[in-house]
Amino acid sequence: MNQTSLESFFSDVGRALGTAGVNRSAETVRRYAEHTMACGDIVPSGVVYPASTADVQAIVRAAGRHGVALYPVSTGHNIGLGSKAAARAGQVVVDLGYRMNRILEIHDKLAYAVVEPGVSYQMLYDELVRRGDKLMLDVTSGPPQGGMIGNALDKGAGYTPYFDHFGFSCGLEVVLGNGEVLRTGDGALDSATLANWHTSKYSFGPILDGVFAQSNYGIVTRMGVWLLPRPPVVRSFHFTFPDDSDLGTIVDLCRPLKMSNFVPTLFRVANDLYLCGSEGESPEYAASGGERSISDEGRRALRAKHGLGAWTVSGAFYGPSVAATEPMIQRVREHFGQGGKATYIDHADAPRHAALQVAINAFSGVPSLGELGLLKWRPGGGNLWFLPGTPMDGAVANEFQTICRRIYEAHGLDYMVMNVCGPRFARGLHVLAFNRESAGERARADACYRAMSEAVAGRGVFVGRAPIQYHDHHMAQTMASYRDTCGAIKSALDPAGVIAPGRYGIG
Ligand SMILES: Cc1cc2nc3c(=O)[nH]c(=O)nc-3n(C[C@H](O)[C@H](O)[C@H](O)COP(=O)(O)OP(=O)(O)OC[C@H]3O[C@@H](n4cnc5c(N)ncnc54)[C@H](O)[C@@H]3O)c2cc1C
């Protein structure tokens, strides 16, 4: 990308969007370069702020004319996965959320909302509460300022029955690489009045929505999201288990409850450090000069202090009243009580453990800040997420725990993980918390990530989402025909290659 092309691009965009649409100040460029990953800052060429779909079209067309690479973000709160930082240095960040942040519609009867990219979990939650709190949205347990479109496109997830954020989205508006606008699903009907754009997921023709998740084929400017009727009562339950090796038993206990859909939420099966790590800095970090992961004695002390286990399991029931949920609670207590190792924590007692309040909020569709404390476990704010999944088989879960725990320890890092368990599959949310200001620690975090990625891929397990610094690495792990297909779709939908080249290892 040469300087003359960039200047021409920015002057075209400035003309189309006005001065509020472009910012190239040193301070802005510095802020958008920041992230928490193990590589250096990724400095963009500038930032543009569209206010409408037409503005996005103007930006994409100008990029095509001048050969400029764009990088769209919705709110840019993808912390530990890239934040606002572009796939490659020099790309122009398209900050959609800054001005395109309207809730376009809330349909009370059919329980859906339609949002622009800047609408965050907190914004939609606040609006639903303002309208009488009759509808509930599925939230993440990450930053409340995170955007619903960015999260869904990155295949983010929550914890209620509507946990699958892309799965429970319905109907996209997308600006393609050639500047054309595409509506997906029923929205493809060539009509000015659309009755089912945001209610019917599978309409005539191929399901095109999916190609815009974790790709770089278009810029999404509008999305429908399905909402749940808010249940009168959310009643959580929690069990602590004392030993690391109890994970296998827990997974085998969770599986039948999810397969029969007896428990409507996903299970959060978090290890000691995932929960205690939000509560303060590592007590042993300074003592070892940042060289050593926390000791077993240190972990036991934290568990005792916070009243949590080596593993803590959380789930919830929904019902019309507390009394109506009581038989379900009794059944789940008997179920987890088998083997005699589980200690029950009741819904009413749970909030005295701050980390369990985060779980209750997640099951209740309430955004919360609590888990962000994990970023302070070590100084320097480094954070990467390693996100493989395992089949819901206890023996396999324990095997993967052993592999990853050993790799964390070999790199002087602290093993922090939450397994989010469904009926057949559990996503392992591995937190790598490290001191980003230490070059040595950055290098160890990077080496740890790569070693785990290779170890689990060697056993047939892939990641579901990844920090942007590893997108090329993971794409290189796929079969050749998958890469060729992704490349062919890119050439068809974005022939000039202007949208986020390199994101998800494509283009
Ligand atoms: C402590 C902690 C806990 C977390 N917990 C969770 C959790 O429970 N669940 C979860 O899913 N995540 C979690 N996260 C990760 C992350 O913070 C959220 O997923 C966040 O909401 C995503 O950021 P965003 O919505 O701002 O998306 P963005 O950063 O705006 O975008 C995410 C990706 O999508 C692309 N993109 C964004 N908008 C568009 C668009 N309009 N068109 C085309 N491409 C686009 C971007 O280029 C980027 O690659 C957690 C993070 C932390 C630090």
Image (spheres, rainbow, N blue to C red):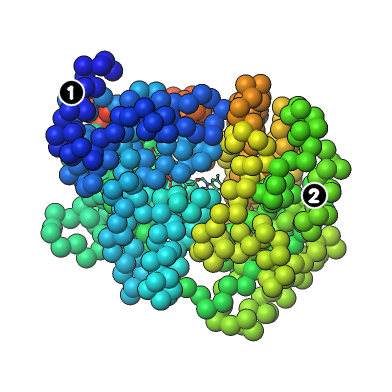
Q: List x then y, in percent, for residue 483.
A: 41, 27
The amino acid type, in three-letter code, at marker 1 is: Ser
Q: List x then y, in percent, for residue 165.
A: 44, 53
Q: Nearer the viewer, residue 167 or 444?
A: 444
Q: Is residue 34 left or right of residue 1?
A: right
The kind of secondary structure element at disc 2 is helix
Q: Is residue 91 left or right of residue 287?
A: left
Residue at image point 28% right, 64% down: 105
Q: Is residue 153 left or right of residue 412?
A: left
Residue at image point 27% right, 40% down: 49
Q: Label 1 belongs to which residue? A: 8
Quarter of the rendering occupied by the C terminus:
top left
Q: Nearer the viewer, residue 365 or 100?
A: 100
Q: List x then y, in percent, for residue 172.
A: 29, 51
- The answer to whether 319 is drawn above or below residue 62 in the figure is below
Query: Tags 1 and 2 in contact by the CB under 8 Å rule?
Result: no
Ligand 1, seen in the image, is in the quarter at top left
Q: List x then y, in percent, for residue 63.
A: 22, 28
Residue at image point 48% right, 60% down: 138
Rendering quarter of residue 378: top right
- The answer to whether 436 is drawn above or below residue 117 in the figure is above
Q: Label 2 belongs to which residue? A: 302
